[in-house]
Image (tube, rainbow, N blue to C red):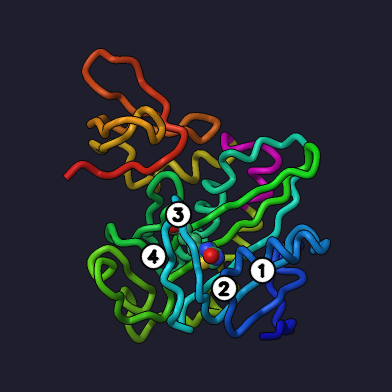
Amino acid sequence: MSGSFETMSFATRWLGRPREHWAELGSTNDRAMAWARAGAPHGALVTADAQTAGRGRLGRAWASESGEDLYVSAILRPAAGKAIGALGLAVGVGLREGLARWLPTTQLKWPNDVLVGGRKLAGILCEARWIGSSPEVIVGFGVNVGRARFPGPLADSATSLRRELAAAAPGREEVLASILPALEAALGEFFAGGFAAIRGRYEPHCALVGKTVLVDLANGAGPKVQATALGLADDGALLVAPGDGEPPRRVESGDVWLAP
Ligand code: BTN
């Protein structure tokens, strides 16, 4: 397997420069991690036509065999001491805005699933390590672009641009070229002002706000309880009201589901 550098350039200042494209990788996040360790700069990008071991959040697999979807990892080097806990939410903002020209009703399911009509269109996996107080972050995202069918349990829960738009669906490079400038802008605002600076571009598109949700208030260690999603805090935590008269509670990690 060998890497090659694509010549196509994007309408960005720093994101996607340089770019390394592979026909097949285990995981673009793993390749980006190795490249980062070898000194790749802030903004460097890894893409692949297919992944043999694509991974999602919470130890899940990310089906990546199609050769028609986007598998992308960016290397980010935020300034030392920056709070990056809500970085994945900023990535969601960028993806949603980059996809909105084709699918304006695209929503974000906290923390960072990208949904259309309740089905998952894209997912985000951020992985970080610290070199002293300087974070090195790999932002991985997968966008279902050209896939017409999904296997097994994904058949009802996933969608693609092609499934939504049929013949009007854009190609992979066109989608990437739309996402990267939107992502660069969202990340720039996030790095300058934290999640508070882009909360107004997340909350109105959040699929959970105002809805009854099932949530684990012990952040992964407790049973699911029913609550109303109220909105997002300045640091990106989901605020929920578990019951009448009870004070709002913060959800900082894990999964949240819409109540059936
Ligand atoms: C999720 O929704 O669980 C996150 C999915 C993230 C998938 C992408 S595809 C590109 C990058 N490489 C990986 O192995 N995972 C991310």
Horizontal arrangement in the rendering, residue 72 relative to residue 152 (left or right)? right
Q: Between disc 2 and disc 3, whose residue precedes? A: 2
Distance from the alpha carbon under mark 3 to that under mark 4: 19 Å
Distance from the alpha carbon under mark 4 to that under mark 1: 23 Å
Residue 10 seen by the camera: yes
Question: On residue 59, which mark appears?
Answer: 3
Q: Between disc 1 and disc 3, whose residue precedes? A: 1
Please state which of residues 54 and 237 is positioned toward the viewer in this rendering. Answer: 54
Q: Secondary structure at mark 1?
A: helix
Query: Mark 1 and 3 residues: CB-CB less than 8 Å, in contact?
Result: no
Q: Which residue is mark 1?
A: 31
Q: Between disc 4 and disc 1, whose residue precedes? A: 1
Question: On residue 138, which mark appears?
Answer: none
Q: Secondary structure at mark 4?
A: strand
Q: Secondary structure at mark 3?
A: helix
Label 3 sits on what residue type?
Gly
Which residue corresponds to the image point at 64% horizontal and 81% vertical from the top-left?
Answer: 22
Distance from the alpha carbon under mark 2 to that under mark 1: 8 Å
Which residue corresponds to the image point at 77% horizontal and 71% vertical from the top-left?
Answer: 18
Q: Which residue is mark 2?
A: 26
